[in-house]
Amino acid sequence: MHIDKLMEQNFAETFYAAEKNSIDGHLFNFISQEKYFSAIKYFPHYPIKFRNKLVGGALLDKNRFHIAVLKEYRGKVGKEIIASIDWGLSYFNPFEARINAKNVEAKNLIKRYKSKIIKKNDQEETYLIFRRT
C-alpha cells in the first residue's frame, strides 16, 4: 500500500476510535466503520500526535471544526490542539466548535482565542472561534 494511503488509513482508524468516546460517540451506532473510513478522506484533517504517535486529530466539515483525541492522551496534547485550531482557522475564520460542557481543558484552550458562545445546554456549548490577533 502507498505510504499516503497508509497514513490516511491510520488517521481514519485513530480518529474513529477517538470519536467513539467523544460527545458524538452515539452517532457511530448509525454508520459502519467502512462507510466512515471512506467518507473521512474527503474532509480536511490535521493529525494530533504525542511523542510522534498519532493519538487523534482535527477535522473540518465546512465551517465546523471537530477535535477527537484518544482518551488516554487527553490533557497531554494541548500544544498540538492549539496548532490544529490555528490550522483550522487558516481555512475558516471564524469556525464553529462544540465542546462538552464538562471539558474544562478545552474551555481553557478556547480562552486563547476570541470566541463567542452561540448555543449552550447542559451537555455541550457551541462556540464561534476567531483567529488570534
Image (spheres, helix red, strand yellow):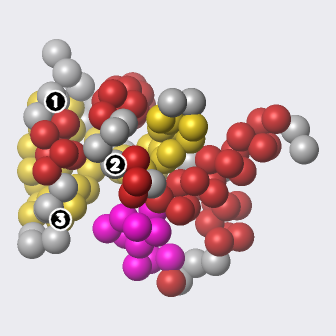
- Foreground residue, 11 or 133? 11
Q: Which residues are magenta?
A: 19-28
Q: In the rendered image, is residue 12 in sight?
A: yes
Q: Residue 19's image quarter?
A: bottom left
Q: Residue 60, how many percent across, how many down?
A: 45, 45
Specify the principal SS of the magenta part: helix
Instruction: Mark 3 or mark 2: name the one nearer the start of the chain.
Output: 2
Pointer 1: what residue? Answer: 113
Q: Mark 2: few, some, or many residues within 10 Å (few <14, many ≥20)?
A: some
Residue at 55% of width from left, 61% of height from top? Answer: 16
Q: Amino acid at mark 1?
A: Tyr
Q: Identify the disc placed on residue 71.
A: none
Q: Is residue 69 left or right of residue 76?
A: right
Instruction: Mark 2 or mark 1: name the one nearer the start of the chain.
Output: 2
Q: Residue 69, how many percent across, how many down?
A: 42, 50
Pointer 3: what residue? Answer: 124
Q: Residue 29, how many percent across, how many down?
A: 50, 84
> What is the C-alpha distance between the residues marked 2 and 1?
20 Å
Q: Quadrant of the C terminus?
A: top left
